[in-house]
Image: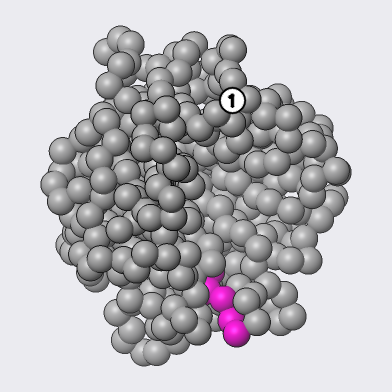
Amino acid sequence: MEGLFALGSNGSGQLGLGHKEDVSVPKQVIFSQPLRTEDVTTHVAAGGNHTVLITALGKAYWSGDYALPAKDKEDTKLVFTELPLPKPSDTAPVMYAACTWDSTVFAVGDSDGRATEIYVCGTVENEEPRFTASEEGQSGPLLISDFPPAGTAITGIAAGFRHIVVVLDNGDVYGWGNGRKGQLGQLENESDGKDTVRHPRKIEGIPFKVSKAVCSQYATCVIAEPGDGRIMVLGADKWELKSQAPREVPSWKTITASWGGIYILKRDGEIVSWGRNDHGQLPPPGLPELSQITAGSEHVVALTQAGEVLAWGWGEHGNCGPHTDGKFGDVKGRWNVLASLKNLPEGSSITAIGAGCATSWINIAVDGIFL
């Protein structure tokens, strides 16, 4: 069976362990129905108290607080359950997903393998999403009408505390949700009077084609394709996210963001980062060469070239492992090892890592069989 392990905050059952207790060592998650051997977890998206998993076969699973529209918000799952989508995954696979505090957004593929539809669950700004559902009275995720623009496809989704950003294959960026800090660009007359955008709108003024976007709590960072690597940060300058941003990082491999920091992994395995560091969120000195990195709300999970999963930052819920410092559970100026190939059976591999709101995730395989 598929080998996904989780640790950290679990007060709403968002780790999918069958209970609501925080854990500080990796525990294998539970699915309501066994997954097919090849249907492994490829991406983790986490909100404040819910988690959504995307698998290799394009299915979506959720655990924790509600992931459906607000009328179903009392429904809480303690194990991962398949999310009902309007179209079957074999013809419309889920390709991308991201979570705000209490909503989830999915990009669904078409027959050509291009992500051309967006569905939303939950709420933005504590209100029902004001999008047209594909079917009146639909109880599952709601289809956003007239998006993306004809002839374009979605290549990525990112979400902050209460805003969502989508990157298209032509380099344009669209966003909606809370824009009062400027995280959706200059709104002018396109919001509802409370700086909340109710339908995807193009973010103007970006002087390059965007390859990827990431979101902090109240800011959005966009970056041009590798080789160019120009960077632009929109929104609040809290933690100096705008004023300390480098102009460009041409050799970037991966970019990720916590609520208060932005992290760019370069091709040489080093990290460029800036932002909040009061709990040790920025990279500690002496890190080994990294192959993957992902940021949660206020912590970071990284995979080294040698096959160790590291964590540092704010770990008060056990998300950085059991060994923390001080009353806030910091892992500051150092890192903890959450998993290591040295301690796994021969032939093991770590195929994916994830980080959410004080949660950490590790997927492990052994000789093609997922533990």
Q: Residues within 10 Å of mark 1 (few under 14, many from 20)?
A: many
Q: Secondary structure at mark 1?
A: strand
Q: Residue 77, percent across and down?
A: 20, 59
Where is 344 relative to 34, above or below?
A: above
Residue occupying the point 54% across, 15% down = 284
| Residue lying at 37% horizontally and 34% vertically, measured from the top left | 344
Closest to the observer: 309 or 83? Answer: 309
Q: Identify the residue at horizontal 43%, vertical 50% (top origin).
A: 367
- Residue at 50% in and 84% down: 91
In the rendered structure, does residue 106 fall within the stretch colored magenta? yes
**Disc 1: which residue:** 275
Q: Depth check: 84 or 3 in front?
A: 3
Q: Is residue 235 left or right of residue 364?
A: right
Magenta-colored segment: predominant secondary structure: strand
> Which residue is nearer to you in this view: 66 or 13?
13
Check the image and name the residue furthest to the front.
346
Q: Give the magenta part as a residue range.
A: 105-111
Q: Is residue 219 magenta?
A: no
Q: Position of residue 6 (x, y in %)?
A: 31, 42
Quarter of the image for the N terminus: give it.
Answer: bottom left
